[in-house]
Image: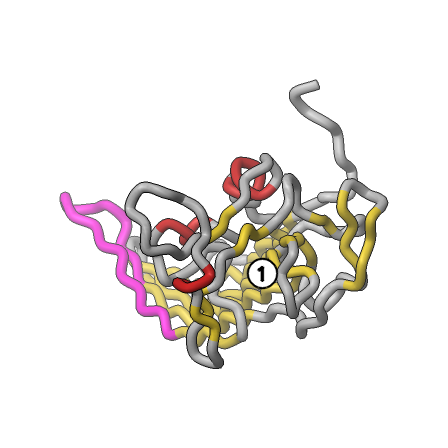
Amino acid sequence: RLYEPDSNNFAPRVGFAWDVMNNGRTKVSGSYGHYIPIIPLDMNIRSLNGERDGATYNYDLNSPACDPAAERVTDEIDNECVIRGKLVDAVDPDIKSPYADEIVFGVEQQLGTNWSVGVRGIYRSLRKIIEDTCVPSDTCDNYAFFNPGFTQEVCLLGTDCEPAPQFGPARRYFRGFEVMAQKRLSDRWMVYASYLYGTLKGNYDGAFRAIGGFFAKDP
């Protein structure tokens, strides 16, 4: 089937608006959202599709064979002939979708017949992610998808399981305060102005690597 129903990935949104003075001019509003981002298709295209990567070192322009004399492995350099990964990556059998929560609360006041001003606070929290890692972490014989901070083991084809490398959970917090002013269209002109002050803190920069290049689409 093109679509497999999944009741576990439930992403509700709920909000309210209250005419607090009962005069149609003062609004208090708020909302909560639970968001599940799209997982990069690069995971299916590369990591779950038999792709492997490797490196060969030699002094021959015509042969792909490894030459031990060309290898160099030190504490600073790792020029070793190697084929990394297996035909498919290991996966946490209990892997969960990444998600984030958002809470917004604001107040808006109408001034006269054409103007309104308002303020609102915004809070966003990244709660869980999917990442890839080496297994075992010291030799990197293969790669695995897991939830950092939650996964205990990863399995190849659902049976060949091994302990997952342990990392702290990914966290990213956005806190913002926005001031807005708006004039509705009248006398042939309108305006909407806002200023947002925000902070973004955490240990995870996002689902796509910030460094760019070929591997930018990797999880």
Q: Quadrant of residue 129?
A: bottom right
Q: Amino acid at mark 1?
A: Glu
Q: Position of residue 210 (x, y in %)?
A: 39, 62
User: Is-magenta flag for residue 193?
Assistant: yes
Left or right for 205, reference 136: left
Count residues near mark 1 (Cα–Cα under 10 Å), then give few for <14, some for 14-19, many for 20+: some
Q: Compared with residue 168, is residue 211 higher up or lower down, i.e. above or below?
A: above
Q: Position of residue 33 (x, y in %)?
A: 61, 54
Q: Quadrant of residue 18?
A: bottom right
* Residue at 76%, 55% in the rendered image: 154
Q: Which residue bears the numbered disc 1?
A: 102
The answer to whether residue 176 shows anywhere in this view is: no
User: Is-magenta flag for residue 189?
Assistant: yes
Task: List the single residue furthest toward the top.
Answer: 1
Q: Quadrant of residue 198?
A: bottom left
Q: Nearer the viewer, residue 107 or 14?
A: 14
Q: Position of residue 194 (x, y in %)?
A: 31, 64
Left or right for 189, reference 154: left
Q: How is the image coloured?
A: secondary structure
- Secondary structure predominantly adopted by residues drawn in magenta: strand
* Residue at 67%, 74% in the rendered image: 168
What span is in magenta?
A: 181-197
Task: List the single residue furthest toward the bottom.
Answer: 75
Q: Nearer the viewer, residue 127 or 103?
A: 127
Q: Position of residue 38 (x, y in %)?
A: 55, 44
Left or right for 211, reference 127: left
Q: What is the quadrant of the N terminus in the image? A: top right
Helix, strand or loop for disc 1 = strand
* Residue at 65%, 70% in the rendered image: 138
